[in-house]
Amino acid sequence: MAPPKKVRSGARNASLVPGIKKFSRSKMYHKKGLWAIKAKNGGSLPTHAPKPAAEPVAEKAPKFYPADDVKKSTRKPKKQNPTKLRDSITPGTVLILLAGHFMGKRVIFLKQLDSGLLLVTGPFKVNGVPLRRVTQSYVIATSTKVDISNVDVSKYDDKYFTKEKKTKSKKSEGEFFKSESEEKDEGPLPQFKKDDQKVVDGQLMKAIECVPDLKTYLSVRFTLRDGMKPHQLVF
């Protein structure tokens, strides 16, 4: 009677401790018999050609059909319509910002961009608000208006305000220990944007000086004081 075959109860080359095997690489080379396979094939391991790809099988018609008719969706993809501008907001209207870094500042509305955002400015020379985009839901339109027919804002669009993407690189030892405030520093404003701001400010200042006390009105921040009722205010 032949002796029963030994059943392997674990890996052929078990780990003694993490990173150290029971047998070395040369020992496993002989245990697997790779030397004999190489000898039969002229000193190299045999290579097998990849199997040819199977031909695609033609789809057969289903044997059974659903009992109820499955309705196909007739919904058309929703078209992105341009944001409707409020009737109270027209080019030259003085707006009050309700949120953001310049909350409470009075700005002049220049035009609506393709994205639906409003292009406004302080101007920067009067109250420090540069050319920027704001959402019309965060502004209050006032009855004060400025003639901006001589202000050229045709070159400003959404691409003008997009920031350049910086490629991430490996940090050096000194950069690794920088604080978050230093990392968030975006550096100086490009010179061409400073020049554009000066041009727009110069054109607006001519229109502002034609209206008495308008410069002082734009430079004062809007605030609510004791006793003021917001629902009764007329802007």
Image (cartoon, rainbow, N blue to C red):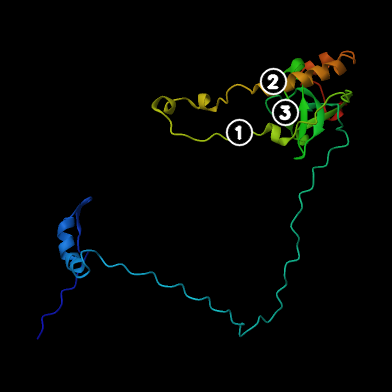
The answer to which of marks 1 and 2 sits earlier in the sequence is 1
Distance Cα–Cα, label 3 vs label 1 = 17 Å
Q: Is residue 119 visible?
A: yes
Instruction: Identify the amino acid type marked 2.
Output: Lys
User: Which residue is located at x 77 percent, y 52 percent?
Assistant: 79
Question: Residue 162 at what x, y percent from top left?
Answer: 66, 34
Residue under label 3:
132
Question: Residue 2 at what x, y percent from top left?
Answer: 10, 83
Residue under label 1:
164
Q: Which callout, 3 or 1, points to the residue nearer the camera?
A: 1
- Mark 3 Cα shell of 10 Å, populated few (<14), some (14-19), many (≥20): few
Distance Cα–Cα, label 3 vs label 2 = 13 Å
Quadrant of the rendering where the C terminus is positioned: top right
Residue under label 2:
194
Question: Residue 126 at what x, y percent from top left?
Answer: 77, 15
Most foreground residue, 87 or 187: 187
